[in-house]
Each structure stands twice: as structure tokens, then as C-alpha cells.
Image: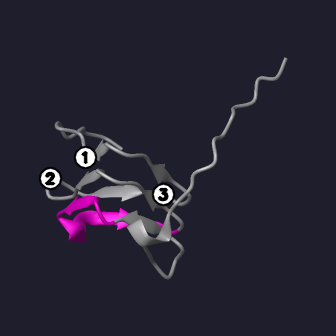
Amino acid sequence: MSLGCVVEPINVHSEDYIQTVQGSKYSEDADFFGSPNINLAGKIIIEHDVVLRGDLAKIKVGKNCIIRSNCVIRPPSKKQKGV
């Protein structure tokens, strides 16, 4: 019995995506709000109909992340004290 995860291959059609120098691929259908507050590390795939809400507060996405279609990434609605 194997406990490993099964990873499906992701096929990215280059005509639908914008590729950066760092190797990231962004769908032309993705929406970025508040771009100065969005920090994206290298080699990220952002699929279609994704919304990144940097207009609410700063957000960071680390290296080698895949943000699948119809996803909304926004900061928490309530700011936490501490670390």
C-alpha cells in the first residue's frame, strides 16, 4: 500500500499564458488587483480565472506554486497581532 500522493501533469498551452524571465507562467485571464502589493517568487503557474487581491493588503506566493483555476487569493479579513 502506497501512501504517496498522485500528481497529475499540468499541460500549459503557451498561447494562453505569459511567460516571465524567471520561468513563471501567468494566464491572460488572471486578474491582479493592487499589483505593487503582490509578491510572486519564481516558477509559478497561475491558471485562468484566478484573482489575486493585493489591493486589500500585501500578499506573497512562494516558489514553485501552482494556483489552479477559479481560485481567489486575498489576505485575511482581520489583522492578527503578534508574529
Label 2: which secondary element: loop
- Asked if the magenta segment contains residue 36, the reply would be yes
- In the foreground, 11 or 59: 11
Residue ID at (48%, 57%): 62
Type of amino acid at the residue the image marks with label 2: Leu
- Asked if the magenta segment contains residue 17, the reply would be no
Say if 13 sits above or below 56 in the image: below
Q: How many marks?
A: 3
- In the foreground, 53 or 5: 5
Contact? badges 3 and 2 (CB < 8 Å): no
Residue ID at (46%, 67%): 25
Q: Give x and y (percent) for residue 78.
A: 17, 36
First-in-chain label (3 vs 1) = 3
First-in-chain label (3 vs 2) = 2
Label 1: which secondary element: loop
- In the foreground, 44 or 61: 44
User: In the figure, is residue 31 to the left or right of 11?
Assistant: left
Magenta residue span? 28-42
C-alpha distance separating marks 1 and 2: 7 Å
Type of amino acid at the residue the image marks with label 1: Arg
Residue hosting label 2: 56
Contact? badges 1 and 2 (CB < 8 Å): yes
C-alpha distance separating marks 3 and 2: 19 Å
Label 3: which secondary element: loop
Residue hosting label 3: 62
Q: Residue furthest right?
A: 1
